[in-house]
Image: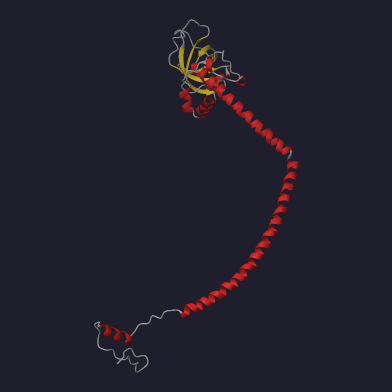
Amino acid sequence: MNNFLLALIVLMMNPALLKAASTINRPIETLQIDADSFYDVNFDYSRFSGRVTDRDSTTSIVKVSSENKNVKYFRAGDVIEFKIQNNKESDFCQGNVRSIEENYFVMFVKDLYPCFPKEDYFRRGTALVMHSEKLATRVREASIYRASLLNKKKDFLGQLNSINQDVWNFEERKIQIVADYDKKIAEIEKQKAKAMDLLLSQKNDQIRLQRELAFRLDNIDKEINFYRIENQELLFDRWHMDHDLGYPVYEKPEVIRPRRVSGESTID
């Protein structure tokens, strides 16, 4: 039943799906509808009466009023069978719904002669006996949907009742909440003082450690400078080393003489 209600809600929100689903014939005895929906499974909702209130000159477009409030569930294109109330032995004529108004609907009638004599005048005010399986199907679906809305209303009323109780008990809840938070604030203040003391102690320890590390770094810098390996480009000594090892070398380089005049770009 719950799955069926969910499916029906989706259908009601989508007119295209609802139109397709309305063609499915559901046996009346299988419906499980609460009494709050005012649906009577033993009543035939497919039959109702109406009265012609207006028509066009060709009697193809007919406007019908009905005391049956369920005509509001009609949709454009729905098929309606009808015949004249005083002529019960005749066949049913067929019409298609064109539009819906409150307590009225307009239908298109292709041919009146199966249910109305050709020689008679189709008058305004003529009482009609009507039959529509589409209407009965839509009434069943509307009743199920209304039952789901009633359940939703009960849920909302329960939520509203809970909210009303919270509003009425506001002052009492306010005092309780303030007391709880005051207790928490006192506990937090205590934790704050303890944390600040711990932080100050850590700061003093770090200052002492900072001095010790700075002293050791100075000593390490001195040792690094002492143990630095000098890597200078050799001039004369390198020529002697290559010459002793038998490597090909140029003639012994001359001593570089300084420039004669400051700023000159050449050397003799």
Depth check: give the residue in front, 233 or 154: 233
Location of residue 40 in the rendering, given as x and y in whole percent from the top left corner: 58, 15
Location of the C terminus by quadrant is bottom left
Location of the N terminus by quadrant is top right
- Occupied quadrant, residue 259: bottom left
Q: Does residue 183 appear to the left or right of 142 in the view shown?
A: right
Residue 53 appears in the figure = no
Location of residue 205 in the rendering, given as x and y in whole percent from the top left corner: 63, 67
Residue 186 appears in the figure = yes
Depth check: give the residue in front, 141 or 200: 200
Decide: is 126 above or below 227.
above
Q: How many marks?
A: 0
Q: Residue at x 63, y 32 (%)?
A: 156
Location of residue 155 in the rendering, given as x and y in whole percent from the top left corner: 63, 30
Q: Residue furthest front?
A: 245
Location of residue 41 in the rendering, given as x and y in whole percent from the top left corner: 56, 15
Q: Residue at x 74, y 39 (%)?
A: 169
Decide: is 144 above or below 224.
above
Depth check: give the residue in front, 134 or 166: 166
